[in-house]
Image (tube, coloured by chain):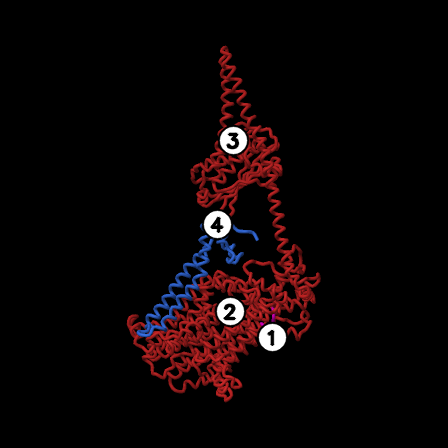
Amino acid sequence: MPQGPVFLERRNYKARRVIDAAHILPLLGIFLWSVPFLWQSIEEPSILISSAGLYVFGVWLLLIISQFVLSWKLRHLPEDVQRSIDVSGSDKAEL
Amino acid sequence: MLNLLIFVCLLYVGLLFAVAFIAEKAAMRGRGRWLRSAWIYTLSISIYCTAWTFYGAVGYAARSGLEFLTIYIGPSLVMFGWWWVLRKLVRIGRSQRVTSIADLLSSRFGKSNSLAALITFLAVVGTTPYIALQLQSVTLSFEVFAASGQVGESATLGGNTAFWVAVGLALFTIVFGTRNLDVNERHHGVVIAIAVEAIVKLFALLAVGVFVVWGLMGGIGQTFAKIDQSSLAHWSVDNSRWASLTFLSAAAFLCLPRMFQVLVVENEDEAFLETASWAFPLYLLLMSLFVVPIAVVGLDILPSDANPDLFVLTLPLSQGQDSLAILAFLGGFSSATSMVIVASIALSTMVSNHVVMPLFLRVSGNRLSMSGDVRKVILTARRLSIAVILLLGYLYYSLSGGGAALAAIGLVSFTGVVQVLPALIGGIFWRGATRLGALWGVGTGFGIWLYTLFIPSLGLDLGFLMQLMQLGPFEISWLRPQALFGISGLDPLVHAVFWSISLNSLVFVFVSLISFPSPLERLQAVQFVNTFDHAPSPHSWNGRVGQSEELMVMAQRILGSLEAQALFQSEVVKQGGAGYLPEPTPEFLQKLERALAGSVGAATAHAMMGKIMGGLAVSVQDLMAVADETAQMLEYSNRLEMQSDELVRTAGQLRRANDKLTRLSVQKDAFLSQISHELRTPMTSILAFAEILRDGPDLSSDDLNKYAGIIHEESLRLTQLLDDLLDLSVLENGQVTLKISSTAIEPLLQRAALTVGGGAELDKLALRVKLPESCPEIKTDDTRLGQVFINLIANAVKYCEAAAPSLTVTGFQRGRQLVLDFVDNGRGIPKDQQDLIFEKFSRAGDQKAGGAGLGLAICKEIMQRLGGDISYLPGQGGAGFRILLPLDDGRSLKRV
């Protein structure tokens, strides 16, 4: 296997972090939408449906906006990074 | 009222037909660029929102509060995580020409048709209730209007609404879903009609929501207050249901045949996912925004026996908002019809490819390439399947009596279809997943689903069933359908999801670990799991000359003659031949199989190829199976070969570098003697004449002038040489400052020619300049560029040995670069010198002209500073130099 360089240019480094963010976003979503697990144990006064709804919808909107920004950034990745992702599946990508 | 409704409804259906028709026409004429946009793609995904979502979500909210949100949160998470799974699925779908989810799995697991048939069966069983649900929703919504109108009007429809809706849907689907046997299995007309319906249903639900919040409640503040006073005021979602429903909807989003159809099969461009990844969650958010307000107001205003599943319709009706109600009806109608259309297309593809075609192949035996059009068989099979699937849906609807809450059937159906998930995820991420593992895993999950959820959900009033539910089979209590292993008290749905998915995965992994896959399966596994590596395709076919014609006959019958001929001809052109029949190379056979798979599915295509190619494929397979480790050894030796190739390449590079260094060293020695000579010659004459001047005071003024002139001239030569050296070292160290300005090329060239012409050998050289009409001005340092031009022209003057020397400068634009070629008609530069001429101190051959060999080295340095390049252009009939200049406003200059 040919070894890639150890250090990347700033530009490529940044591009890889964008891809990392794309990987992490759904995990963040799972985490934030797991918060309602805690509400069941709250006895009195229990969470009002309006605040619960605001929370769930708020998380939703936050994720949509983040994804919007991310997808814009992903579309403007440098071409060579895009190629190297396609080839190596980003999993084996250099740090 | 009802007549008006039927009229509007027919008008709407007519509109959909028209839209689909226009889209098909546009696509056929190749003008449908707008058909292939990320927005249409996103809208088509919205078939996830069926009538269950449109009407049912409100009912769901009225019964269980915010729990309905899980149905939307799951798919949103999948879209947010598109980089994990969807991207890979779409890539595989495109590279393997996948036609359905069953096809994907069968193709992954060794093109196994048994697996495909199992999944097809599962999909039909899981989807039929869902289609019934859509028919039911349309019927119910019709009845709402009938009830609100005068008595007797409902009689005009009788109980046949569902039947006629089913017939209409079957017609639409057959017309637009099976119009052609597309190689890519894409349906522009259907997709565009669905996109229109997506907009209609969103608009309708938002309209009802706005009416409720601002029309009935009087604003957002009051709405919140009202919600908190209602019976839904408190968060009451059970944790296990919140988690398992979110998981279930996320998994169903990937596994439902209709979702797979729009997400993967109809996908035209991977980049669409980028847009859909945020736009589709936004769509879902908007669809669920007003659900709770509508539910709360409905519970408040409408009589307590009103069906909450129909609040979306009954609320506007009760307020006398007839047009809003009709809009809401159209929204629900859209949701139901779009789901049924896509689901029946997806299912009919699966049924025809994985059930009908294999049977047909078996029956027709070896007469495959003889007579008849297979295309007709496939299309007929698809049309019949669509009709049968809709009929099944209708039968299920009329037999079940249309009872039960809408949402319940939806979730039961989801759980059934989701059993594909472990095999799907395992198949694309784990090379060790095997066909047997997938078969056993899916089978186990499916069985548990039938036992714990589907049969109990039918609610049949049979004695032995009641006994089974309460006591377990043969009174074994730990096998009770809703309390497996003695764990009772769980929500039945959570119970079924938990046990079916976990045991399914467990069996899948375990059987995969202990079973041994066939060679074909292992090859496919590599292709799927490493789909981003562009792994070379495995070659499982070996063709003989003469089989091409048979292949052509078969391909024509499946792909259509024009498409097949185009495919064959393009291959002939690629192989450099003429005519229609290419050599049956393994690559071509592979390509052909993929193309066939796009029409009839991977398993069938493989079988058809096998029939024509005879036992060859089998023998290769047998061979590999016999010497089973062959594949592994092959892999290993391939890797060794690659490594040794790389070593050879590296060694070659090293040798070339070494040669160059040796030659450079020789050059340098030569230069040193050259430069000493160059310095020494003028020095000697300067010394000599200076001595004469000093020692001979009686010189005439003429002689004085002459000798001083010689000293001056020689000093100039020395200074020039030293200047060049200095210039080069300044350039090399990057200490040079560039003066950037807008420069036109032509005047600069003329000036350079004048400068050279003004020197010694004027007008001997014919200079021809051919620049493009609109040669752009470039931002560069014109003095430095001029220096390069002067050097090249001067070189041509000095070295070109033709009788009538000429230099042609040709300019053209290529991308963001301006290319200038300087070509003279001399002897050119010998091949072994070409890579050295840009080195310092190098001079090509022993030429008459003087000079220290610094000119081209300086040119190279200058061009690199200017963000361009200069290189030798061989094969021009003379010495040729190519200059590249950047056109991008001097931006690349700063980098240096």
Spatial distance from mark 1 to mark 4, Cα to Cα?
Answer: 56 Å
Contact check, label 2 and label 3, Cβ < 8 Å: no
Q: Is residue B706 visible?
A: no
Badge 4: residue crowd in 10 Å (few <14, some 14–19, many ≥20): few
Displayed quadrant of residue B329: bottom left
CA gap, disc 2 to disc 3? 71 Å
Majority SS type along the magenta span: helix
Q: Which mark is residue B409?
A: none
Q: Front-most of B767 and B342?
A: B342
| Residues packed near mark 1 inside 10 Å, few (<14), some (14 to 19) or many (20 plus) | some
Callout 4 amino acid: Phe
Residue at the spot x=45%, y=77% of the render?
B493
Asked where in the image residue B660 lies, by quadrant, the reply is: top right
Picture colour for chain A: blue
How far apart marks 1 and 3 lie (CA) works out to 83 Å
Mark 4 — residue?
A: A7
Q: Position of residue B172 (x, y in %)?
A: 51, 74
> What is the secondary structure assignment of the residue under circle 1?
helix
Three-letter code for the amino acid on which mark 2 is drawn: Phe
Q: To which residue does mark 3 refer?
A: B756
- In this view, the residue in front, B175 or B284, is B284
Check disc 3 and give the amino acid type: Val
Q: What residue is disc 1 on?
A: B356
Q: How many marks?
A: 4
Q: Is residue B773 left or right of residue B635?
A: left
Foreground disc of the pair 1, 4: 4
Judging from the image, what secondary structure is the residue with disc 4 in? loop
Residues shaded magenta:
B111-115
Q: Chain of mark 3?
A: B
In the figure, the shade used to draw chain B is red
Q: Earlier in the sequence, mark 1 or mark 2?
A: 2
